Amino acid sequence: MKLIHTLLPLVVCIASIARAEVAENLVADGVPAVSKELKAEASRYLEFRAASFSGWHPKRREMLIATRFADSVQMHEVRMPGGARRQLTFTPEPVGSGSWQPSYGNYILFAQDSGGGEFYQYYRLDTGTGRITLLTDGKSRNGSGRFARSGEKFAYTSTRRTGLDTDIYVMNPANPTTDKLLCELSGGGWSVSDWSHDETKLLINEYVSINQSRVYLVDAKTGAKELLTPDAAASVAYSGALFAKDDKSIFLTSDAGSEFHRLTRMDLKTRTVQVLTADIPWDVAEFDLSPDGKTIAFVTNEEGLGRLHLRDARTGKKLRAPELPAGIPSGVTWHENGRDLAFNFTSARSPADAYSYDIKTAKLERWTESETGGLNTSRFVEPELVRIKSFDGLQISGFLYRPDSKQFPGKRPVIVNIHGGPESQSRPIFQARNNYYMSELGVAVFYPNVRGSAGFGKTFLTLDNGFKREDSVKDIGAFLDWIAKDAALDGDRVAVMGGSYGGYMTLACLTHFSDRLRCGVDVVGISSFITFLKNTQDYRRDLRRVEYGDERDPAMAEFLQQISPLTNVEKIRKPLFVVQGKNDPRVPVTEAEQMVKAVRDQGGAAWYLMAKDEGHGFQKKKNADFQFISTIQFLQEQLLP
């Protein structure tokens, strides 16, 4: 807080105006008061909703979904396709995930954190009384919970023992006193994948990096674990492990012998592996096995677009699947009836909503239709896929949303919006409020996938690791070259923005390309790799060292210090807007504070917005609305003229 106090005198001239406009939970330091006209104009773009499927009722054909009707996402029940959404939770904090008890459905178990700190706790909601009971300790970080099929056992991870290691615990949620430590583990990358049908074993996954993970079989009584995947030290990634119906084999995805994750089946006795999707040259992003064990549903990521598949679980034979428009299906989950498959779907012109597909009748049904603030989404821009060669000849790509040339003639300014991760991917999802940039400001928005992005093979993922970190920044330079050559884009009016690792990329671009950029918006970004690795939460530190480099090595520490934006702050000569959550466990608030101070100390311009009740990005609607309107104002002042 001392830093914030030292910054306040710099904006004393607007303090009296801004104080009346800004909620007490926000610190808007250097952010001018927003005009009522801008608020009114942008208001239509602030009312988009989305709905995501959370689980099927075990006895009835009803869905549990997550959606927002007030300030935060809550659990709702939908009893039929197109039915009303009946709210079940009414808490001030967003509800992260939820599921019905899998045998009777007499209660709902859900996860929730406080203030965006990501120290998730599990709660039981008794649907008959509405009473909510805390099941975990209220302090540690808990997650990746999985019910056994009887509903009497629930396995999950928790950091409660050391604050660093994610151990496996088991409880009967109906009786929290049954909670017990099953398996002590080392490191923060562990998760629970599945229970065997006889409930004697668990499958757990150890995440080392996006290029390396392992699957273990755990005795549900003793906690003894056995490595199932070969070559423990090899750079092979496994995920999504599920038991077959007879518990004699498991399904999982793996990039062993391939650039991409393929769906495979492993015999637990012989450890022989059968590849089921050898014919698909893309990642299998997720899958689910039908209750009878005969049909497997999975989603592939094909250069950003998603495709839903159905196959015979034994032979891999293709089965009839729904024909969906260009977009992204996700969250595939079978109902216990064995015929209804639930999934979410989103596209450039459709918010995320819940659907089901009946494999016997081939009937596709939409369960939710999320509100769009009265706007006609069919008029929103469809993206175009852009492919270029980078500085070293590597092919890189991204999605470009161009504004209507009839409505906005001439060269258009551009926002380059860089994804986080860095092991993530920009995909053609619904742009929601970001449609304001294209539809109202006439700004083109470009989402690049630089080297290190997911979805393009495991080699591509490694091309920004360690001492190659700034090669991804050079990729942005190649995109800037391409923008300058496009007759419809204005290479002299380009802004860069991004969140998390994308925030680092924003700052790094401002140090490398200040002469080619108008401004930047850094949301929860890393300003110094050294201080970031020191201050990020303990359970994350080793996982991040694998990606960014181990600062305990002197050569790596020197390199990380050298490339950090904070070290090169004197090269930032364009206005900066920094957004941060005070309770961020990933990129601590100190990363933002030190960057804002450094920019201002050298005479630069920096707006600073901090929410006291948020973490790694703003989740509460009021906060997100203020951030968005302030960002519009920043771009109107710095990018559009």
Image (tube, rainbow, N blue to C red):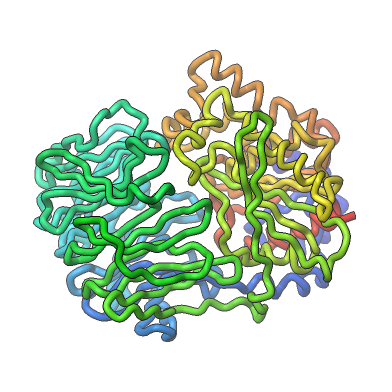
The image shows residue 310 at horizontal and vertical percentages of: 32, 64
The image shows residue 277 at horizontal and vertical percentages of: 32, 51
Instruction: Say whether residue 62 is left or right of residue 507.
Output: left
Residue farthest to the top, as pictured: 554
Res. 140 visible in picture: no
Residue 76 higher or lower than 175, as above or below? below
The image shows residue 314 at horizontal and vertical percentages of: 19, 56
Residue 151 higher or lower than 240, as above or below? below
Q: What residue is at 42 percent from the left and 38 percent from the top?
A: 259
Q: Quadrant of residue 351?
A: bottom right
Q: How many marks?
A: 0
Instruction: Say whether residue 553 is left or right of residue 279.
Output: right
Of 151 and 7, nearer the camera is 151
Q: What residue is at 56 percent from the left and 55 percent from the top?
A: 427
Q: What residue is at 64 percent from the left and 42 percent from the top?
A: 503
Q: Quadrant of residue 597?
A: top right
Of 376 and 458, nearer the camera is 458
Q: What residue is at 34 percent from the left and 35 percent from the top?
A: 257
The image shows residue 546 at horizontal and vertical percentages of: 45, 29
Res. 354 visible in picture: yes
Residue 78 higher or lower than 284, as above or below? below
Q: Quadrant of the C terminus?
A: bottom right
Q: Quadrant of the N terminus?
A: top right
Instruction: Say whether residue 47 is left or right of residue 607.
Output: left
Instruction: Say whether residue 362 is left or right of residue 26.
Output: left
Of 232 and 274, nearer the camera is 274
